[in-house]
Image (cartoon, rainbow, N blue to C red):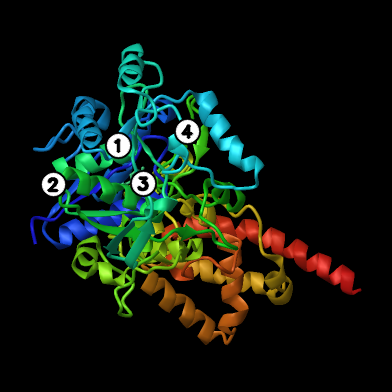
Amino acid sequence: MDRVRVRFAPSPTGPLNVGGLRTALYDYLFAKKHSGDFILRIEDTDANREVPGTEKYIIDALKWAGISPDEGPGIGGDYGPYRQSERKALYKEYAEKLIAEGMAYYAFDSSEELEALRNSKMADGIPSVKYNYASRESMTNSLTLNQEAVEQKINDGVNVTVRLKMPKDRIISFVDEVRGSVSFNTSELDDKIIMKADGMPTYHLANIVDDHLMKISHVIRGEEWLSSTAHHLFMYEALGWEPPKFAHLSLILKPVGKGKLSKRDSAAFGFPVFPLDWYDEDGNLQFIGFKENGYLPGALMNFLAFLGWNPGTEQELFSMQELVEAFSMDQLVKSGARFDIDKAKWFNQQYILNTEEANLLSLVKDFLTDEQKNKSDDYLSQVVSLMKERMTTTKDLGDIGYYLFEKPRDYEEKMIRKKYKPELKNEVMAILNLLDGLENPTTENIHNAVKGYIEEHELGFGNILPLFRIGLTGTMKGPDLFGTMELFGSSESRSRMEEALIRFDKIYEAKQSSNA
Ligand code: GLU
């Protein structure tokens, strides 16, 4: 096989969503698996649809995701420039060549004429009306006008476009790496515009010219481009070029119901579908990102890798390098993959558990309030190690574990109603005194001391420990109790318990009077 060169070719018409990012990931994995090149090409031939800031967003998102291109805008490479708008001069020659070969023609139709074409057959109840082998006979183009009129039109420079001359009734077949053998009848394909009136090529022409000139070996892209591939192959043949291999990826589907995952799903369900936050031109946050919601890039990429691919084994956790080694196009699935945010959370949790604590701390810090961040690094490291298993994202520590930074805002009353009796106050105080006296209050020493006291006085763990859990953190769902005691130290533990006991007494009194 010639050198594997795979390009990711987004149009800067909006921020890159997880669908685009997954395409980029598969592009990258395939390229790296075969020791090839991963190229970023910005397809910005349609200035009207361009959204400022999206090219930067794409580059930042790829960088965060850990799939940095070998060639691309701002990176360089032997096949640049990598922005199509900077390659404009290149494309005309090939459009002219296609015209000379009789595979394309000039079309001069005004927007009114095109509108009329669209409406004409709609009225007869024929839905898909196209500029094609049949209708082109009655339109304003170089096939219907004489030479002189054509030259005149070109000189006037009004509505000068170039269209592909798709033949009637020819079968174009190819073997798609995901779908297998695919065929199109050219009678069903329209005469796509390949050069626009503004002198810019359309996606179709620019795409094949660049794939050829950049020596792209494999085109891996979304399935929405499947039918365009027939047009592309038609041009490759007309220009006498060897086409690349094609792989069309299935869609990422909505979490519920049918259809493609969209940004509306993000708004409706409150989870991100974009890698990074996206702000509109007025600086308002328009779409939330995985990064800013506490997802680790490795976890997101691992999750995305599995949306449409599987290694054929039970293994689910893969580093990027392992994904590169395991990836193969044969294991791409033909059907759409449902976007399951719970699965993304699961991956994230696994990645959090496997992240070294010092790194995790610096990730978590980004999301703590200024007040929470004021704690010493030592304290914060202990918090991270206590809460690691309970975090789904690096964002939620400050929320779900807020009580490690401040006194509980509330206490779970049910357990207190069940377990607390004023007589137990003395036992609580005795245990706090015991903590005061510990020379080396490690989790283990605290555990042993408390356990010893409870056993010695035959109090029963289940009668005492819940009081401490709730008194110290407000909840039964907090982290390891003795670890929490070590974190707080004896004086903070005492002050929390004293405050809690006042509440516990009130809860007890309320219970007594309602029982009376
Ligand atoms: N510019 C196209 C897009 O944004 C690229 C499609 C392709 O990879 O050929 O989807």
How far from the left and from the top, in percent, is residue 315? 31, 76
Of mark 2 and mark 3, the one earlier in the sequence is: 2
**Residue type at mark 2?**
Lys
Question: Marks 2 and 1: which is nearer the front?
Answer: 1
Give the alpha-carbon distance from disc 4 to disc 1, as whole Å: 16 Å
Q: Is mark 4 within 8 Å of ligand 1?
A: no
Of mark 2 and mark 1, the one earlier in the sequence is: 1
Q: Where residue 104 is drawn, which disc sits there?
A: 1
Give the alpha-carbon distance from disc 2 to disc 1, as whole Å: 24 Å
**Would you call the spot at circle 1 few (<14 residues within 10 Å), some (14-19), or many (20 or more)?**
many
How far from the left and from the top, in percent, is residue 462? 59, 81
**Residue type at mark 1?**
Ala
Identity of the residue drawn at 13% across and 46% down: 215
Question: Marks 2 and 3: which is nearer the front?
Answer: 2
Asked which secondary structure carries label 2, the reply is loop
**Residue type at mark 4?**
Ser
Identity of the residue drawn at 38% across and 65% down: 308
Q: Which residue is mark 3?
A: 376
Relative to the observer, which residue lies in front, 274 or 242? 242
516 w.r.t. 253: above or below: below
